[in-house]
Image (tube, rainbow, N blue to C red):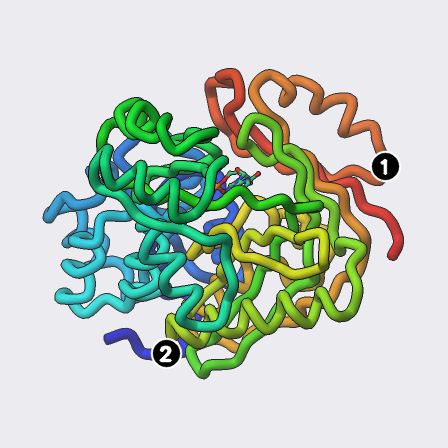
C-alpha cells in the first residue's frame, strides 16, 4: 500500500487521457509529482503533458501491471472505468481513489439515486425497469411526463428519452436499446446548480461555492460562479455534498449536479466521482482549484482553501469555437485553457475560457 502522504517525486497514475486527465496531470506536476496516464487512444491530451503514457485498454492486464509498477496511487478522470480494472489494481497493492464504492454508485443511475435517498440527499421520484412492461409500470409510478435514462453509460444527455404518456414507454425502451433503464419524474426546476467538494484521506471536507450552469443539447455551455444564491441554498447544498462524501467514505473531488426547484428545494440530479466541467471556474476563481484539490486529496495531502477570489463566467469552447482563441487572447479579463485536441469535431469539448471579474 502507498506510503501517504505521497512524497513529491512519486508517480500518480490516471485512468483516462482526456482534458480532465490533462488538467489533473498539470496540477500534479506543479506539486512535483510525475504522472502516468493509462488510456487506449495514442497521443491523448493528458499523455502529452505527462511523464509516462501506457496505451492499452483500461482492463488490459499488462497495461495495469505497468501502471502498478510506476504508481502507488491511481485515480481516474471518468466514471465508466471498468470495475475489474480497479479491483486488479487494488490486488496489486495500488491505492485507487475515489474507491470502488463511489464508482459502483456513480456507474448506475438506479444505484446512485437509491444511495442518495438513503443518505438524506433528495432526488426526483424514480423507478427502474428491465422490460417494456416494467417501463410502463415505472412511468405510471413516477407519473408522466417522465425521463427514461439508461442505467449505465449515459453522459451529456445521451441515452435519454422523454416519455409523454405511459403507453409510449415500450417504444422509448426499445429506442434506448432494450437495456435496463430508470424512469425519472420531470423536475420542474428553475435553475441548474452544481457543487464541487472534496474529502481528504483524513475525512476533512472542503466545499467550493455553488456554480449556476446552462446546458444546450445536453452539453454544458456556460457556468457562472459563485452562483447568486441564498445562504439557505448554500447550506442545503453543502449538507448534501457532505452526506455524499461521508456516505461513500470518499477520497478526492466530487461534482454534484443539482436542480433548484421553484420553492428553493435542491434535488440531486447526478454525482460525478471526479473533477467536473462545472468546476473549471476554480482554475481562475480560487487559490486552490479543483484539479490541485483532487491531487492533494488522493496523495494524502491537506486540502486547500476553497473560497472564491473572483467571480468567473466559464464558457466551454465546442468544436470550431476553439478557433476564436485569438479573440479571447486579446481580452484582458479572459483566461484560456485549451486541451490540445487535434480534431475539432462538432460539439467536442476543445477548451474553455474563464472570464474573470472582481467579486
Ligand atoms: P444527466 O445526463 O442526467 O445529467 O441529464 C442531462 C440534462 O437533462 C440535465 O442537465 C437536465 O437539464 C436534464 N434533466 C435530467 N434529468 C431531468 C429530470 N428528471 N427532469 C428534467 N430535466 C432533467
Category of crowding for the residue at label 1, using alpha-carbon neighbours closer than 10 angstroms: few (below 14), some (14–19), many (at least 20): few
Which label was assigned to residue 4?
2
Disc 1 to disc 2, C-alpha distance: 41 Å
What is the x, y in percent for residue 200? 47, 75
- 359 relative to 145 in the view: left or right: right
Which label was assigned to residue 222?
none
Residue at 50% across, 53% down: 124
Tell me the quadrant of the picture where the C terminus can be found.
bottom right
- 159 relative to 231 in the view: left or right: left
- 22 relative to 257 in the view: left or right: left
- Residue 352 in which image quadrant: top right
139, above or below 260, in the image: above
Residue at 69% across, 43% down: 223
What is the x, y in percent for residue 217? 56, 26
Residue at 29% across, 65% down: 101
Which label was assigned to residue 332?
1
The front one of 10 and 137 is 137
- Residue 173 in which image quadrant: top left
Q: Residue furthest left?
A: 61
The front one of 149 and 188 is 188
64, above or below 12, in the image: above
What is the x, y in percent for residue 301? 49, 75
Q: Residue furthest bottom?
A: 202
**Label 2 secondary element:** loop
- 151 relative to 325 in the view: left or right: left
| Marks 1 and 2, the one that precedes in the sequence | 2
Residue 22 appears in view: no
Residue 182 appears in view: yes
Residue at 50% across, 25% down: 348
Q: Is the shortest distance between ligand 1 and the CB of mark 2 under 8 Å?
A: no
Amino acid at each position: 500500500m502507498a506510503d501517504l502522504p505521497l512524497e513529491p517525486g512519486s508517480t500518480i497514475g490516471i485512468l483516462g487521457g482526456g482534458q480532465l486527465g490533462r488538467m489533473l496531470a498539470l496540477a500534479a506536476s506543479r506539486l512535483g509529482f510525475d504522472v502516468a496516464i493509462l488510456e487506449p487512444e495514442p497521443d491523448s491530451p493528458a499523455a502529452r503533458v505527462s511523464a509516462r503514457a501506457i496505451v492499452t485498454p483500461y482492463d488490459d492486464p499488462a497495461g495495469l501491471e505497468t501502471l502498478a509498477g510506476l504508481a502507488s496511487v491511481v485515480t481516474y478522470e471518468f466514471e465508466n472505468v471498468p470495475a475489474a480494472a480497479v479491483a486488479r489494481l487494488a490486488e496489486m497493492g495500488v491505492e485507487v481513489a475515489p474507491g470502488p464504492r463511489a464508482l459502483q454508485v456513480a456507474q448506475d443511475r438506479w444505484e446512485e439515486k437509491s444511495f442518495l435517498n438513503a443518505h438524506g440527499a433528495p432526488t426526483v421520484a424514480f423507478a427502474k425497469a428491465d422490460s417494456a412492461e416494467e417501463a410502463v409500470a415505472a412511468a405510471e409510478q413516477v407519473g408522466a411526463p417522465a425521463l427514461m435514462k439508461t442505467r449505465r453509460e449515459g453522459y451529456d444527455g445521451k441515452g435519454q428519452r422523454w416519455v409523454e404518456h405511459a403507453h409510449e414507454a415500450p417504444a422509448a425502451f426499445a429506442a434506448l436499446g432494450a437495456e435496463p433503464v430508470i424512469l425519472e419524474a420531470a423536475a420542474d426546476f428553475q435553475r441548474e446548480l452544481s457543487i464541487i467538494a472534496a474529502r481528504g484521506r483524513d475525512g476533512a471536507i472542503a466545499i467550493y461555492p455553488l456554480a449556476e450552469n446552462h446546458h444546450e443539447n445536453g452539453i454544458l455551455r456556460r457556468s457562472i460562479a459563485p452562483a447568486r444564491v441564498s445562504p439557505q441554498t448554500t447550506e442545503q447544498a453543502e449538507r448534501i455534498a457532505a452526506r455524499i462524501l461521508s456516505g461513500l467514505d470518499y477520497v478526492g473531488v466530487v461534482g454534484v449536479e443539482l436542480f433548484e426547484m421553484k420553492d428553493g428545494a435542491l434535488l440531486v440530479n447526478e454525482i460525478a466521482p471526479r473533477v467536473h466541467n462545472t468546476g473549471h471556474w476554480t482554475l481562475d476563481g480560487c487559490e486552490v482549484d479543483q484539479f490541485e484539490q483532487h491531487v492533494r486529496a488522493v496523495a494524502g495531502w491537506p486540502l486547500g482553501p476553497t473560497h472564491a477570489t473572483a467571480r468567473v463566467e466559464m464558457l466551454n469552447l465546442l468544436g470550431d469555437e476553439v478557433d476564436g482563441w485569438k479573440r479571447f487572447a486579446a481580452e484582458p479579463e479572459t483566461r484560456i485553457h485549451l486541451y490540445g485536441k487535434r480534431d475539432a469535431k462538432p460539439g467536442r469539448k476543445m477548451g474553455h475560457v474563464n472570464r474573470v471579474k472582481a467579486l
